[in-house]
């Protein structure tokens, strides 16, 4: 057989074999599972001043959720809230007037909610707000039988607040509020002290008790010059009310609010300047 004829015969046999074989398998398509729905919505708060410059070190609080944060060096504070909706946000900084804003969250991941603070004067009166969410763990109080019924510290941290204060304190207000849990005490007490200092009436602690909210006012006549020194600590404790002979608490979440009024006089000015 001529070489050309032999070559044509081999090609014909190969083509016939390919035609009779199974077609190649189609590529498999792998379907990726849809990501789970988000469990929270991001809330970004940008705090700026009158000149629209970022304010760092401001305290930002989402009311009703127990969420607190401090703005970073570009003025941002981030929170994860349960869902889109309308929230009340409190912003405080010692150099600015407090701001309370209503923020509407629609769920956009890149949304920025700007809050502008107004400059407070460098001297005069100003007010500072502090918040502390706590938990009261199991405790029993029986008059003349057990301890004082103060809420004990637990695995999540201490049950009392310690606020480091600014200079020039002239008045203070405290409040503890809660939504009563099952098997929790219906009434509580609130105590405020400045460790190492006595009040103007000679006492070392101020107290109040009752149902939620329990309020306590420390007026100017009870605060001494030592209370107004920069960096003093106000310690606020909660516990079972002493108004009942026997009371008990199994588990109770609460929030302590401290409101502090200050007065700082204008600094002396050198007449030569």
Image (tube, rainbow, N blue to C red):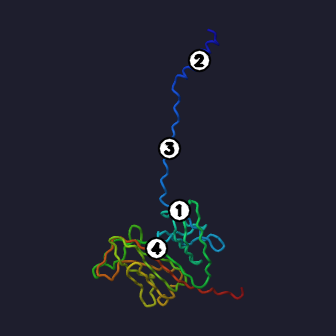
Q: Crowding near pointer 3: few (<14 within 10 Å), some, many (20+)?
A: few
Number of the label disc, if any, that sits on residue 132:
4
Mark 4 or 1, which is nearer the eye? 1
Residue highlighted by disc 1:
42
Instruction: Answer whether labels 3 and 1 touch (C-beta < 8 Å).
Output: no
- Above or below: residue 88 compared with residue 204: above
* Residue 159, placed above or below residue 111: below
Position of residue 189 measured from the top left corner of the image (x, y, whole percent): 38, 80
Whether residue 231 sits left or right of residue 252 in the image: it is: right
Q: Residue at the spot x=42%, y=79% of the render? A: 213
From mark 3 to mark 1, how far is it between C-alphas?
A: 29 Å
Helix, strand or loop at disc 1? strand
Residue topped by disc 2: 12
* Sequence order check, earlier mark of 3 and 4: 3
Q: Which mark is residue 31?
A: 3
Q: Earlier in the sequence, mark 2 or mark 3?
A: 2
Q: Dot 4, how many residues are within 10 Å of its Cα: few (below 14), some (14-19), or many (20+)?
A: some
How far is mark 2 from mark 4, CA to CA? Answer: 88 Å
Task: Name the mark on residue 59.
Answer: none
């Amino acid at each position: 057989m001529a070489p050309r004829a032999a070559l044509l015969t081999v090609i014909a046999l190969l083509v016939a074999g390919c035609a009779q074989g199974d077609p190649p398998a189609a590529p498999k398509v792998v379907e990726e599972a849809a990501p789970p729905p988000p469990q929270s919505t991001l809330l970004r708060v940008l705090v700026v001043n009158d000149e629209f410059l970022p304010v760092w070190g401001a305290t930002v609080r989402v009311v009703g959720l127990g969420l607190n944060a401090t703005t970073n060096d570009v003025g941002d504070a981030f929170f994860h809230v349960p869902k889109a909706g309308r929230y009340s946000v409190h912003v405080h900084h010692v150099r600015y007037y407090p701001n309370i804003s209503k923020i509407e969250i629609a769920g956009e991941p890149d949304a920025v909610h700007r809050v502008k603070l107004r400059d407070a004067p460098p001297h005069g009166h100003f007010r500072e707000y502090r918040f502390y969410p706590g938990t009261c763990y199991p405790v029993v109080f029986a008059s003349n039988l057990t301890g004082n019924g103060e809420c004990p510290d637990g695995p999540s941290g201490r049950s009392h607040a310690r606020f480091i204060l600014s200079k020039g304190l002239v008045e203070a207000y405290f409040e503890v509020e809660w939504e009563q849990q099952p098997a929790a005490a219906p009434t509580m007490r609130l105590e405020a002290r400045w460790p190492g200092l006595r009040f103007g009436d000679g006492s070392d602690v101020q107290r109040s008790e009752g149902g939620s909210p329990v309020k306590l006012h420390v007026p100017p006549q009870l605060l001494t010059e030592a209370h107004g020194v920069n960096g003093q600590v106000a310690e606020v404790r909660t516990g079972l009310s002493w108004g009942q002979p026997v009371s008990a608490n199994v588990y109770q979440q609460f929030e302590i609010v401290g409101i502090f009024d200050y007065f700082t006089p204008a600094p002396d000015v050198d007449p030569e300047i």
